[in-house]
Amino acid sequence: MSIPENFRCENTDRIVSAMQCFADLMIQMEMIFHERLDAGRLARAVELACDAEPLLGCRYVDGKKPYWERLEKEDRNAFRLAASENEYEDFRNLSIEALVGPQISVCLHQAGDGDRLLVKVAHEVADAGGVKDIVEVISRIYRELRSNPQFEPVPNLKGDRSEKQLMKQIPMLSRPRIFMNYLRETWGVFIPPRGHSIPVTNRTDNRKFFITRTFEPEAVEYLRRLGRKSHASLNDTLMTAIVRAHASMGNWDGELPLRIWTTIDNRRYLQDGKTGGICNLSAVEIITIGNRIGSTFFDTLSCVASLSERRKKSWLGLNTYIGLFPLFRFMSTNAIRNLMTHSTDFFMRTGIVQAALTNMGEVSPERVKFDSSPVEAHLLVPPVFPPLLGFGLSGYKGSLTLSAGVYQSSTQPETVSILVDRVISELRI
């Protein structure tokens, strides 16, 4: 089947591209295997994945009317074999350029104690849910090539990547209520127009690295039991710990409101959670905790759980899709980018919101099965620019991994390290 030279750019693609003002827009999945992977077969699987989902083999063309342009085969070199641990680590810390393409870059390091595989994806083409879809495509092709070396996938040319697939699931009668939720959230964010922040110096260059902390299944089960006392989810418990750790630093005066960014994967509203193609279908909401966090962890957890429960009952994750995205359809890409830049500058200047928790969800062993499933797997959150502080959370086989990308030339690494230690202290694990 012939693959077109150009592809349509969706509204969500433009919006994510405009978010370059506050983060390095890449999401990564890292996997560890005890056995050796077939490097040649893996390289071929990555190449064919760029045909199976053709946008992966494209570059993002910016401008008044952005679009995706298919790269020539020789320009779609998306696989590399790292010769050393240092080379692998350098790759992990390297940015991916959507404007250059391709939209994925894969690195394999074959160490003596097993293989490490890293799949790096440009956020312009996919969110964390999309990254899991991409790794599933690569692993499925890899398995197929074992018995059929001549295998070639059928390109996905008609799958819906737009937000329309989501909006079809939202009853018209519910949309006024969602719009009111959007107005209520906006009021909570901007009134009062200031918030608590920790002093963090700005970066002077783009050198970065990742801080990760993995909680083993026993610790995760303990956290689940901890949350049940307040009818709270695991995400509520982690969010509470981050909020309290954040409040414990930077001389919080007890009056300024505490807020936290969080993300929601809106695939929850689709049948079987499946999108038509690789895409962005997540949303950001800002949870306003206020200043009444109480004196104990459970005081705060009760507040966070109550806020979360209220939102889950009223179309969680859809506020911007109803309140803001329709406006973006009529705005130029530059206008969206300018709005994002000015908003981010305002947030940084006033401290309205500084900390973020991106829950990237569970990684299913079956979806990332090559010849066998990895013994460990986690997602790495996009590094946010200082003074913002961003954490990502992902799960695999009962464990949880907390990740943060930090910039070396800032005080961000020290701040995030202290925050992580205080989060663990709050959780008592």
Image (spheres, rainbow, N blue to C red):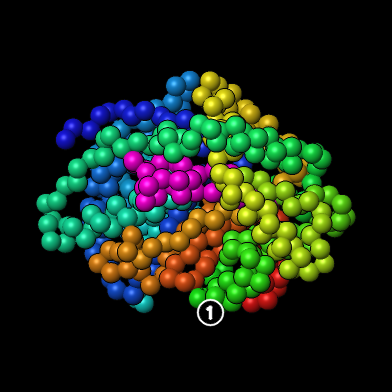
In the image, farthest residue toward the bottom? 218
- The correct choice, above or below, for 374 with respect to 286 in the image is below
| Image: magenta residue range | 260-284
Q: Residue at x 25, y 29 (%)?
A: 4
User: Where is residue 144, by image quadrant?
Assistant: bottom left
Q: Residue at x 36, y 57 (%)?
A: 107
Q: Residue at x 31, y 27 (%)?
A: 6
User: Percent position (x, y) of residue 372?
Assistant: 28, 69
Check residue 373 for magenta coloring. no
User: Percent position (x, y) of residue 375?
Assistant: 38, 72
Q: How many marks?
A: 1
Residue 43 visible in the snapshot: no
**Left or right of 421, for residue 2:** left
**Left or right of 322, for residue 291:** right
Of residues 228 and 136, the one nearer the viewer is 228
User: Where is residue 50, by image quadrant?
Assistant: top left
Q: Quadrant of the N terminus?
A: top left
Of residues 314 and 164, the one nearer the viewer is 314
User: Where is residue 228, by image quadrant?
Assistant: bottom right
Categorize mark 1 by other alpha carbons within 10 Å: few (<14), some (14-19), many (20+). Answer: few
User: Percent position (x, y) of residue 343?
Assistant: 68, 34
User: Percent position (x, y) of residue 293?
Assistant: 79, 60
Q: Which residue is mark 1?
A: 218
In the image, farthest residue toward the front? 173
Check residue 272 for magenta coloring. yes
Of residues 300 and 331, the one nearer the viewer is 300
Q: Quadrant of the C terminus?
A: bottom right
Kind of residue indicated by mark 1? Glu
Q: Residue at x 36, y 28 (%)?
A: 8
Circle 1: element type? helix
- The correct choice, above or below, for 60 with respect to 357 in the image is above
